[in-house]
Amino acid sequence: MSKKQTNLPNLLILGAVLTLAFVATGCGLTEEIGKETYQNNISNNLEETAKTEVKVEEKLTTEKKENTEKNKESNYKNGKYDVKGTYISPAGPEEIKVSVTLVDGLVTETTVVPEATHPVSQKLQTAFSESYKTEVVGKKISDIKLSKVAGASLTTEGFNKALTEIKEQASL
Amino acid sequence: MEKSQCFQFQALGTHWQIDITNSPDIDTADFFVEIKNKINQFEKTYSRFLPDSTLRKIAEEPGDHLLTEEIGHIFDLYYNLYHITKGVFTPLIAQTLIDAGYDEKYSLQQKNTFQKTLSWEEAIDYNFPNLKIKQKTLFDFGAAGKGYIIDIISEMCRKKGIVNFCIDAGGDIFYQNKNLEKLKIGLENPQNFEEVIGVVEIVNKSICASSPSRRKWGDFSHMINPFSHKSPQTVLASWVVADSAMVADALATCLHLVDKKILLPYFHFDYVILYSDGKVEVSKNLEAEIFV
């Protein structure tokens, strides 16, 4: 994971970690197949990665002191921070690794790498999809007023030529 | 009266169209050259089809390498998705694609035997900015590369003060409009390119599509499962709407390989998924009309 700063992240990032941590515990993943292998792979990888372990509760107290002094300067450099947080969920201790991007003091992007050791609820997954039971039909593009069409990338002449050759060979 | 400029060209194996509306006082011809140059540079960095590309040379040389910030950004995404999908989405699919026939020469014929697709741990050790190559290998960034360059060009537009623009790279799109005017986008029917199966409206978002429809040969498409060495069959086409084209592009491919449930906890995105039995799933918050 990218690491541009060795400074400890500020309250903002920790806020993001906490929020994401709480969201992650409520998130929908019921799959347990291969979870153990997955967990081992994650922890093996992370052990080899240099990481900053942050105990969230301790961080909050120290940062509060530092922040009152640094209040005037919000000079947290733009960049990407990796935070590994430990928090106590209702199910027990959980670890979460978050990568946070700061631009002008605002968190613009976050990605979460899952490390949860407890299965998470399936509430979220069922809330997400709306299925169409009947089969879809196509409508002619010329019949509809469209600005754009999104589909598989148009291929180059070179690729199309190769496809045609293969089809011809296959039909011999 | 809106002044609109359009730039069309071929790059990265597909057809591009960039539309700029009401641009500030800039030399658009110059800017289009800048964009073209950036795309060339991008290709020379990431393409597995160019023998001297940066990532190809790195992958062929065991040892430690330092990555640029730009490379780190996409490598981070691949790292995350590799772990989220438990290795099904991997940049190391490159060798497998070649074994299936999707090589530099587009031979499109399966080689005699498939090599095992290397796991992340077998091939590399990644801790930005360090990338350690453990054994000679090859990377494919096809799943997210186009999305990434779309994001980069979007940023170039913004830096020039252009606030209304649309970047369309062969059907992967990023659209920005200061006045929040939506763009109506048809979802191409993968079984009939003259048709669409629905319409989506977006603004200040990217929509990327993924389908084997145009890149299919024998039993394969450009998407292959690294464990089964087979191309997935259940999903005919997927579309993802997200803030960044790189994420939309990557997730659209992921939806052919894994269930959306696996991705939902980690990314903000909307989707339309068309299955081989004709059924469609649309994420709840997406403004989409599906033709039934």
Image: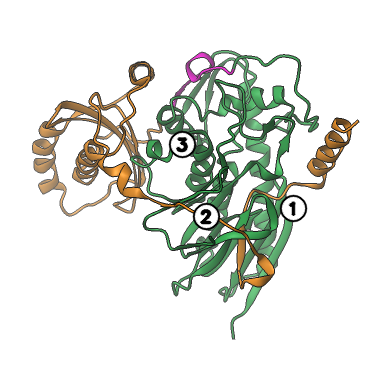
Q: Colour of chain A?
A: orange
State which quarter of the image contains the N terminus of chain B: bottom right
Q: Are marks 1 and 2 in contact (CB under 8 Å)?
A: no
For marks 3 and 2 on the same chain, the one whose residue lies earlier in the sequence = 3
Q: State which quadrant residue B53 falls in.
A: top right
Q: How far separated are the C-alphas under marks 1 and 2? A: 20 Å
| Amino acid at the residue labelled 3 | Leu
Which label is found at residue B10? 1
User: Looking at the picture, do discs 1 and 2 lie on one chain?
Assistant: yes
Q: Label 3: which residue? A: B77
Letter of the chain in green = B
* Quarter of the rendering containing residue A149: bottom right
Residue B248 at x, y = what percent? 49, 48
Front tag of 1 and 2: 2
Subunit of mark 2? B
Cα separation between marks 3 and 1: 26 Å
